Image (cartoon, rainbow, N blue to C red):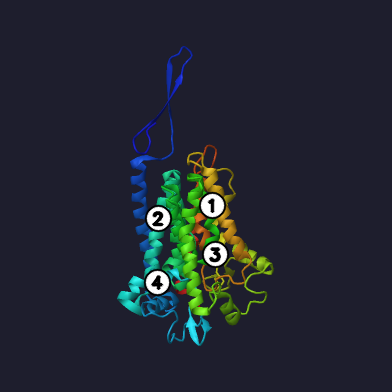
Amino acid sequence: MANEDGSEDVTVAAGPAGSEDVTVVARPEVGSGAEDHARRDALLLGLLALAAYWLSNDGQFMFFNYHLHLAVSFLNGRLYIENPPSWLTEFAFADGKAYVYFDPFPAVFLLPLAAIRGLTVNLAKVSIVVGACNVGLMRLALGGLRVQRGTANWCTLLFGLGTVHMFASWYGNTWMLAHLLAVMALTLAWIEALGAANPVLLGLFCAIAATSRSPAALGTPVFFLLALHRRPRFATAVQFGLPLLATGLLLGLYNVARFGDWLNNGYLLANQALLNPEHGSFSWRYIPRNIQQYFLRVPEPSSSWPYLMLTDHGLSLIATTPAVLLLFRRGWSDRAPNAKLYGRLALLGCAMTFALYLCYFWDGWRQFGSRYTLDFTPLLIVALALRNDPRPGRWRWLLPALVLLSVLVNVWGTWFWRFHRM
């Protein structure tokens, strides 16, 4: 049987009389042909996402742009926001100065744009482009898994148009951009882990994810284990840790310069001052409420058009992306190399990040879907692809059907948010 790249695998076995039997067997998708397919599909799916996100956006300037203000402050040699506008209120104050307490990498990412356009940069448009790039990168990552081409394309479509990644990309405020950059870093880490697995690059991508969205750091041990799996030696751990160590040192210096404390980034202090959570920022007491948020929250019925309503809490992960139910299918791809290892590690990374959010007092607020799930979505998509790669005796139509259902839910959410949200 010919492979997608036009080659064939041949197995030679000795026959009963010493003769040789030639058996043609399938192998995973490899070679330049498969790589060409992955690149072409990545480009097309990325352009599809770009068009969908651009058309979904209402064209308004996004004023919730803390990271842009921080980037402009960096360019002017300040760590604080001078004379912040009245609509930006989430700051940690020290010595009468307003400090952005969100993770700083999005501001670093925006530095070139801020140097050219200053505070006129529209974060919504930046998010649209970043989100579309994420879709292309996800297709490349799934190609690296060597699942079937159809599996990779369906799962990429799910990622781009059937998860809260769609809302984050076209809506594009400062929090959404942070999520999208964490997603980009985690997806790049998957691409690298499935390719050369350079431990320095893997450590760098993990550092970027962690400084875009701190909770994403809980999924990064997956890539450390993958690096060790490829190169099981002490030097691998050292090389992986160098970018993380350097980043930690820079963050510590950043904290000292603002608040005089290596470990104080202002986040917990600001939470207490602004929102005053009943049991602190993290507590097991929040778990029942968060189970409702992440697994059970659905649109609320209404007696008038449009009959189904969204609150600012958004929808659960299952309601936003019904295809996640396919994680309950048994087994892993018998085509992708190391499918069981990659799949189990991906689920472990999801679980570690999700466990933190189950104990967190806040659900993300003013969202279509539960946006915090974005911090482990790249791992979720990898696990879904490996679970649902076609195998004998499996219903192949389930993946496309639930992907299309997920896309319809997110298209409906976009329509509702644009035209019916109060």
Q: Secondary structure at mark 1?
A: helix
Disc 4: which residue: 124
Mark 4: give few (<14), some (14-19) or many (20+) Cα within 10 Å: many
How many numbered discs?
A: 4
Q: Are marks 2 and 3 in contact (CB under 8 Å)?
A: no
Residue at image point 51% right, 75% down: 255
Q: Is residue 72 above or below residue 300?
A: below
Kind of residue sitting beneath label 4: Ala
As shown in the figure, which amino acid type bears the numbered disc 2?
Leu
Residue contact at pointers 1 and 4, CB within 8 angstroms: no
Residue assigned mark 2: 137
In the rendered structure, are the residues bearing label 4 and label 2 in contact, judged by CB atoms less than 8 Å apart? no
Residue of label 1: 346
Between label 4 and label 3, give the one nearer the viewer. 3
The disc labelled 1 sits on which kind of residue?
Answer: Ala
The dot on residue 17 is: none
User: Spatial distance from mark 4 to mark 2, Cα to Cα?
Assistant: 20 Å
Marks 2 and 3, Cα distance to the nearest angstrom?
Answer: 21 Å
Instruction: Classify 10 Å Cα crowding around label 1: few (below 14), some (14-19), many (20 and above).
Output: many
What secondary structure is found at the residue carrying circle 3?
helix
Q: Is residue 309 left or right of residue 247?
A: right
Q: Position of residue 267 (x, y in %)?
A: 55, 75
User: Looking at the image, is mark 2 or mark 3 earlier in the sequence?
Assistant: 2
